[in-house]
Image: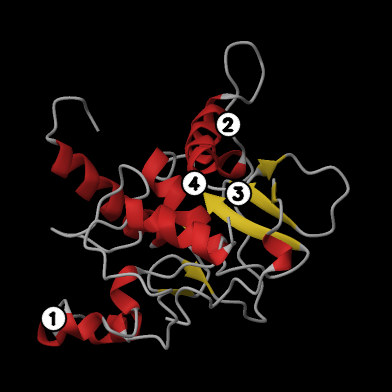
Amino acid sequence: MNEHGAGERESAWAQNRTTTSTLALTDREEMSYIGILTSNKKSSKFLLEGDIQVPRTRNAMRCWYNSCRWLKGQDGKVTIAYKVISTALREIESKTCIRFVPRQYEYDYISVENKAGCYSNLGKQGGRQELSLQRNGCIYKGIIQHEFLHTLGFKHEQTRSDRDRYVRINWANMDRSMVYNFYRSYTDNLNTPYDYNSIMHYGRTIGQRQGPSNWDIQRINLLYNC
């Protein structure tokens, strides 16, 4: 898939140069958030803030043959994950000028793959751009949208430059090896307020994974001049 028009913007730092049906809604949201971090524990990538891929020289470890393949439906076609991904992307398209289209011969494109974890690059990288949605743990609408918003150039809400005015980071309650994931970023917040309801915000009682918030949509439209 490739995003029409993303190459015309310097998107990487524009905004942030900063399961069952019986579960309650908030429980399902929390499972989605925890699912990202749990799935990513097996990844050999260096992931900033839990799910932003940072390039490095060492290649990723190979996956076992069956674990890296998308599952086929009873008709023999690999359509199960595609339907969920497509539904998630269509929702973004319906509220913005962003269009995700199947790749033909484009040099710059997003390659959605079943790797170990849920992660993506930040903004346009050029050429083949990997976005991992592991079939066990990542194929949920909110997680898919979260990762694609990273690809569109958006970081986590709680790392924006003005976050200390709105949230308090409990550094003492944190694994010291994970501290770097919570540093503030030098960000352009597009003159939008801090959004506790953003799909890009970490849990546990803030943020959600049901879909982009109104401010998430507003920021996409501002960034891409929709």
Q: Quadrant of residue 225?
A: bottom right
Picture quarter with the C terminus: bottom right
Mark 4 or 1 closer to N-term? 4
Q: At label 1, which amino acid type do we have?
A: Arg
Q: At label 4, which amino acid type do we have?
A: Gln
Please tell me whether mark 1 or mark 3 is closer to you in this view. 3
Q: Which residue is mark 1?
A: 168
- Residue 94 horizontal side relative to residue 7, left or right: left
Picture quarter with the N terminus: top right
Q: Which residue is mark 4?
A: 134
10 Å crowding of disc 3: few (<14), some (14-19), many (20+): many
Q: In this rendered view, identify the residue nearer to me: 69 or 79.
A: 79
Q: At label 3, which amino acid type do we have?
A: Ile
Residue at point 56%, 61% (across, down): 152
Q: Residue 165: x and y, percent?
A: 17, 83
- Determine whether label 2 and label 4 are within 8 Å by CB: no
Q: At label 2, which amino acid type do we have?
A: Tyr
Q: CA distance from mark 2 to mark 1?
A: 38 Å
Mark 2 or 1 closer to N-term? 2
Q: Which residue is mark 2?
A: 82
Q: Residue furthest top?
A: 75
Q: Residue 28: x and y, percent?
A: 21, 40
- Residue 151 horizontal side relative to residue 22, left or right: right
Placement of 134 over or under 122, stated as above or below:
above
Give the secondary structure at mark 4. loop
Q: CA distance from mark 3 to mark 4?
A: 24 Å
